[in-house]
Image (cartoon, helix red, strand yellow):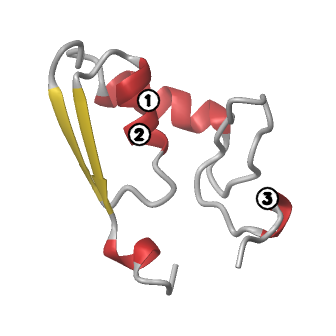
């Protein structure tokens, strides 16, 4: 069953392609600060493994910053309990 975006319990605030912003527990400002620290050495052309990806903010951010490949995994979210 597909739920409307506003009914989803998001962890990360994500800006989607149509510029819709999901209302996550972590704000876009906090995520930007964390991403700048996490990716301070760059990921351009590299492979990234995002373990515990949750909604995937850092996976999408790695792609946006030029990672060649990104694999996101999170049992909690994708097993149906998250």
Residue at the image position 31 percent from the left and 31 percent from the top: 38
For this orientation, the residue located farthest to the front is 1
- Tell me which label, 1 or 3, sits earlier in the chain: 3
Query: Disc 1 to disc 3, how far (Cα)?
Result: 20 Å
**Mark 3 Cα within 10 Å, few/some/many (few <14, many 20+)?**
few
Q: Counting other residues with Cα less than 10 Å from the Cα at mark 1, is it few (<14), some (14-19), or many (20 or more)?
A: some
Q: Residue 22 location in percent, x, y?
A: 74, 48
Residue beneath disc 3: 5
> Measuring 15% from the left and 22% from the top, which residue is drawn there?
46
Q: Which residue is drawn at 40% across and 82% down?
A: 79
Corner quadrant of residue 66: top left
Query: In this picture, is 26 found above or below 11?
Result: above
Quick one: which residue is furthest to the bottom in this view? Answer: 81
From the viewer's perspective, tell me whether residue 69 is left or right of residue 37: left
Please give the residue where the numbered disc 1 appears in the rendered image.
Answer: 61
Disc 2 packing (10 Å; few <14; some 14–19; many ≥20): many
Cβ–Cβ under 8 Å for marks 2 and 1: yes
Is residue 50 toward the left or the right of residue 20 in the image?
left
């Amino acid at each position: 069953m597909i739920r409307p975006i506003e009914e989803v319990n998001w962890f990360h605030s994500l800006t989607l392609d149509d510029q819709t912003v999901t209302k996550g527990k972590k704000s876009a400002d906090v995520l930007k600060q964390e991403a700048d620290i996490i990716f301070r050495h760059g990921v351009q052309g590299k492979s990234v493994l995002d373990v515990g990806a949750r909604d995937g903010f850092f996976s999408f951010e790695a792609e946006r910053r030029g990672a060649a490949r990104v694999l996101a995994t999170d049992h909690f979210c994708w097993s149906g309990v998250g």
